[in-house]
Image: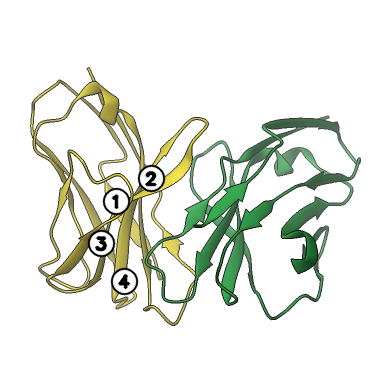
Chain colours: A green, B yellow
Amino acid sequence: AQKVTQAQTEISVVEKEDVTLDCVYETRDTTYYLFWYKQPPSGELVFLIRRNSFDEQNEISGRYSWNFQKSTSSFNFTITASQVVDSAVYFCALTETGANNLFFGTGTRLTVIP
Amino acid sequence: EAQVTQNPRYLITVTGKKLTVTCSQNMNHEYMSWYRQDPGLGLRQIYYSMNVEVTDKGDVPEGYKVSRKEKRNFPLILESPSPNQTSLYFCASRPGLVSYEQFFGPGTRLTVL
């Protein structure tokens, strides 16, 4: 069974602080894909990253970085030097090869205080 | 511009009054799906379609219908809406099973009184 756990319901940080959003997943498949989406206050879902299970290299994109560790079934997301525009709900999601569904975590609401 | 569009964006209705939320994509994607988002539950899949005339249930299909008569359109139908269907709905599309990035529409906020 697939499951995605985002234990942090809400996080508040002061602008310019670094923040890490946790994502722990469960799957029986050896081939799967992990995603992060951002949902700003306007409500749309913005795709941030996709990572397949065979690629454990960490990825950095500007102030965003992702740490994928199969040993702990985690795919954590770090924002460096947070900004007010980073305030949003962030979702981690999982799909298995050939699956017809994208399983989402319950989301983490990040508030960046100016 | 490649996009998924949904209409209406906001809808307030009453219990039992049939409604349809439209979804259209201009990317020639084979795969389309509907999700609902509820507080504390994340997004859950309602129905999906792998191609024209091919649809199947997701995790929470009760109270919903869909159809896929054309590749670009995938409407969501609530024949007799109830208050527990008050939610934020997203339509999504992707090229096929071999490509896993889903493109989401802007969302439809539905309130059933």
Marks 1/2 in contact by CB < 8 Å: the verdict is yes
Marks 3/2 in contact by CB < 8 Å: the verdict is no
Label 3 sits on a secondary structure element that is: strand
C-alpha separation, residue under disc 3 versus residue under disc 4:
12 Å
Q: What is the tally of numbered marks visible in this picture?
A: 4
Same chain, labels 3 and 2 = yes
Of pointers 3 and 1, the one earlier in the residue sequence: 1
| Chain letter of disc 1 in the image | B
Quadrant position of residue B58: bottom left
Mark 3 is on which residue type? Ser
Same chain, labels 1 and 2 = yes
Quarter of the image where the C terminus of chain A is located: top right
Of pointers 3 and 2, the one earlier in the residue sequence: 3
Mark 1 is on which residue type? Gln
Marks 1/4 in contact by CB < 8 Å: the verdict is no
Query: For residue B6, which numbered disc appears in the image?
Result: 1
Query: For residue B31, which numbered disc appears in the image?
Result: 4
Of pointers 1 and 2, the one earlier in the residue sequence: 1
